[in-house]
Amino acid sequence: MEHAPTGHAADDAPGPANYVPLSPVSLLHRAADIYPSKIAVIDGERRFSYTEFRARCCRLASALVARGIGRGDTVAVLAPNTSAMLEAHFGVLMAGAVLNAINIRLDAPTIAYCLRHGKARILLADTEFAALTRAALAQLDAPPPVVDIHAEGFDAHISDTTYEALLSGADPAFRGPGAQDEWQTVSLLYTSGTTGNPKGVLYHSRGAYLNALSNALITGLTPECVYLWTLPMFHCNGWTYPWAVTAVGGTHVCLRKIDAGAIFELIERERVTHLHGAPVVLNLLIHAPAEQKRPITHRVDIGVGGAPPPSRVIADMERLGVHVTHLYGTTETYGPSAICAWQTDWHTQPADAQARLRARQGVRMLAQEDIQVVDTLSGQPVPADGETLGEVLLRGNAVMKGYLDNRDATATALADGFYHTGDLAVRHADGYFEIRDRAKDIIISGGENIASIEVEEALYQHPDILEAAVVAAPDARWGEVPCAFITLREGATLSPEAIQQFCRERLAHFKSPRHILFGPLTKTATGKVQKFALRAQARAHVDATTGVPS
Ligand code: AMP
C-alpha cells in the first residue's frame, strides 16, 4: 500500500535554524562562552584564559582578512607546538583560509617545495627556525611575506613583522567568514608518499570537526583534561586534538621540544591527564635517566600511534603507571581512524597476553564508517583467521578530500569507494585488525615517514654510486631506520661515513641512511630489485651487529 504524504515538506529544506556547516571554530566559541576564565593554553610562563585564547585567534583571523586572505588561500606555519600554532588552528579557519602546518624536521628544499606547491600567501615562522626559513625562502622566485613568531632565546629576525605586532593591531571581536560550507578546505598537510615529491593532503571542515569530536569522546577527554603537546601539530593537525581538547574546554600545555625531563616535570606540575605520541616518545620516557623520571601519582592517559608500538613498549609504559591506548591512522584520514578498544574481559588475561591484544591496531573510530582488510588481488575481505594478509581500506567522513593538484594520485588513493592505506594486516576472529607489513615503500622512523625513493634519488646523485636501494631496518629506538644497499662503480671506493655525509647535505637528517651495505642488489629475473629480500638482509645485519634478534 502506498503511504500518503506526511505533510512534512518544510523539513526538506535545511535553514539557519536547523543546519550549520560543521566547523572546528564553533568548538572554540562554545568553550570561550562557557569557560571564559578557565586556562585554555599554557606556553612556558604564559597562560591564556579561554577569553584571551579566543581573542588572540580572532585577532589573527582579522589580521589575515585585512591582508586580503580568505577562502582558498593558504596560510603556512612553520613552528613547533606553541600557542601561536594552536591559535593558527582556529584563526586561519575563522578567516576562511587553509592552514598549512609544515614539518619543522624537513630540509629547506622540501619546505620550499611545500610553500611553492601549496601557494602559501603568508608564512608564520618561529624564530628558532630562522635559518631554515631563510634557506627555504631563498629557493623561491616569489616568496610569501613572513611573520616572525618570536621564540624566547632565538632572537634572529626573518622579517620586520612580528606575530605579536600583527595581533596587537587587529580586532579581538572579529568573527570572520569561517567555513561557508562543510566541504570547504581547512587544512593542507604534506606527506611523504612512495613517489618523490610530498603530496598535499586536503582536509575539509566537516571531517576536521567530526574527527575532533570522535577523538574527544573515544579517548575520554573532559573539561578537566590537561593535554600535553608531545605530538607535533604539523602531523595531521596534531591528530585533530587542537580542536578536540578545545571542544571539551580542556587545557592545552605547549611543548617546544621533546625532552623526557620536561615531560615528567610538566605531567607532575600541571597535572597533565592526556598526551599522545609515536612509540619513540614512549621509549624516551621509559628509558629516561632516573634523575629525570618522576613518580606518576594521578591518572595519565597516553595515546600511542603513528608507527607500530611493540607490545613490550605498551607493557613498559603501563609499568610507569600510565594508561596506554593504541591508535592507528594516516595523514589521509585526519590521524586516528582506528583504536584498539578495550574489552572488559581482557582483564582476566595475563599481562603479556593483554599487551599483545593491545598491540593490535583495532577497530574503527566514530568518524569512520568502515574499515576493511581485503585481498589485494580479488578486493574481497580476507577471512577473520588472524593469518591471511590483506590491505587496510577505510571509508568515512574523516577521509581526505584528495591530494592538492594531483588528480591521478587522488583517484588511485580513493579508488572503489575506499581510501587505500598501503598497510597490510590480518583480521582476527573478534574483528580487530593487526598490521603485519606495508605494501607502500616507506620507512617510518620515529613516527616520521621517509619515502625510500627520495633517499635513493639522493644516493644516485653520487658519481661513484652505480645502484642503490633503500629499505627499512629495525631499530630499538626509532622503530625503523633507513638501510641503503649500494653497488659502487667499478674501481670506486667510498666509505659509509662519506655516503652518510653526502646524504645529510641533501636530505633532512632523519632521512639519511643509518646502515650502509655494499654489494650487488638482489633482483628478480626481470631485473626488479627485491625489496622484501633486502629487508630480510637488513634485519639480519641489525641482528648480527647488535646481537639482539629484532
Ligand atoms: P602518516 O601518514 O605519516 O601519518 O603515516 C601513516 C602510516 O603510519 C600508516 O599508513 C601506517 O603505516 C603507520 N602507522 C600509523 N599508526 C600505526 C600504528 N598504530 N601501527 C602501525 N603502523 C601505524
Image (spheres, rainbow, N blue to C red):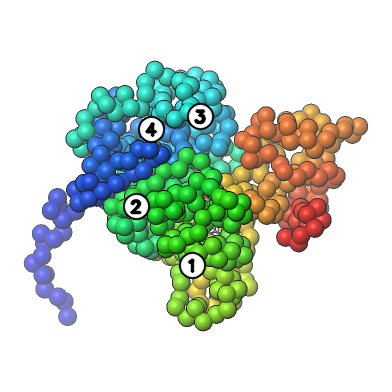
Q: Is mark 3 within 8 Å of ligand 1?
A: no
Residues under labels 3 and 2: Cα distance?
27 Å
Camera-nearest label, 4 or 1? 1
Q: Residue at x 42, y 63 (%)?
A: 299
Total numbered labels placed on residues in the image: 4
Q: Residue at x 71, y 52 (%)?
A: 473
- Per the image, the residue denoted by label 4 is 75
Q: Residue at x 47, y 65 (%)?
A: 323
Label 3 amino acid? Phe
Asked whether the residues under the numbered discs 4 and 3 touch, taking CB atoms below 8 Å apart as contact, a structural biologist would say no
Q: Can the viewer see residue 284 in this picture?
A: no
- Per the image, the residue denoted by label 2 is 245
Specify the quadrant of the image occupied by residue 365: bottom left
Q: Earlier in the sequence, mark 4 or mark 1?
A: 4
Label 2 amino acid? Val
Q: Residues within 10 Å of mark 1 (few under 14, many from 20)?
A: many
Residues under labels 4 and 2: Cα distance?
22 Å
Residue nearest the observer in this picture, 368 or 14: 368
Label 1 amino acid? Cys
Residues under labels 4 and 3: Cα distance?
17 Å
Secondary element type, mark 1: loop
Secondary element type, mark 3: helix
